[in-house]
Amino acid sequence: MSSIFYLVLNGGTDAPKTARHIGQSSFLMKRVRPQNLQAICTLFIAMGLFFFSLGGGVPEARASQKLAIIDAGITTNTGATRLFKLELAETPAQRTKGLMGRKTLADNGGMLFVWPQSALRLFWMKNTPLSLDILFFNASGELVYMHQAAKPYSLETISSIEPAKYVVEIKAGTAKLLGIDSDAKLILKQPLPPAR
């Protein structure tokens, strides 16, 4: 004698007596034999593994991928060059994520955003717990605009004002402390991979 399971589409598998409002002929309840139930479960597991393999995996795993570190210098108002180790954000996904969720940043750390061409750049501080100095540079590496001490989590748009190809985010207060002003220049110490 084979057992019959009742599959209630709202998640339960109780017999009809506990779900009388549904009724046995309802489209919300179907009788399923054990071998069919096993086949249905196997199908759902296979579909889940297939979509996971397509890149729909755990977002934290994708987000925690290490970014390339670039050595860069920024000239100051005294003519000195301050060295930074900047994480490279060269793809649309990396540029979108930026420093979101980051709670700490080294004094000489930050992020370098790179695009294939110059254009007006718009930033915000959504999901960013750190206050940042945001420096916008043109294709020649000249500073075109600097926004100091951007407010954490702010949805206010921060514009480059002029076309920029590079943007550097560093810990808030660093630009003022080091004397980085409107005459600053970005000096890349190594060739960059082509931005996408």
Image (cartoon, rainbow, N blue to C red):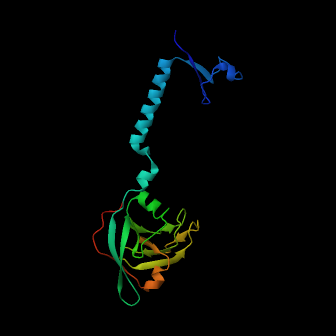
Q: Which one is in front, 80 or 32? A: 32
Q: Can you name the residue that lies furthest to the left here? A: 190
Q: Is residue 57 above or below residue 156?
A: above
Q: Which one is in front, 165 or 15? A: 15
Q: Residue at x 47, y 23 (%)?
A: 38
Q: Can you name the residue that lies furthest to the top here? A: 1
**Is residue 181 visible in the rendered structure shown here?**
no
Res. 83 image quadrant: bottom left
Q: Is residue 161 left or right of residue 18?
A: left
Res. 89 image quadrant: bottom left
Q: Is residue 143 left or right of residue 128?
A: left
Q: Position of residue 171 (x, y in %)?
A: 47, 74
**Is residue 102 visible in the rendered structure shown here?**
yes
Count of marks placed on residues: 0
Q: Position of residue 41 (x, y in %)?
A: 48, 27
Q: Residue at x 44, y 44 (%)?
A: 56
Q: Residue at x 54, y 62 (%)?
A: 127
Q: Position of residue 164 (x, y in %)?
A: 43, 72
Q: Which one is in front, 185 or 128? A: 128
Q: Is residue 190 above or below residue 54?
A: below
Q: Is residue 150 left or right of residue 10?
A: left
Q: Position of residue 67 (x, y in %)?
A: 36, 61
Quadrant, the C terminus: bottom left
Q: Can you name the residue that lies furthest to the right here? A: 21
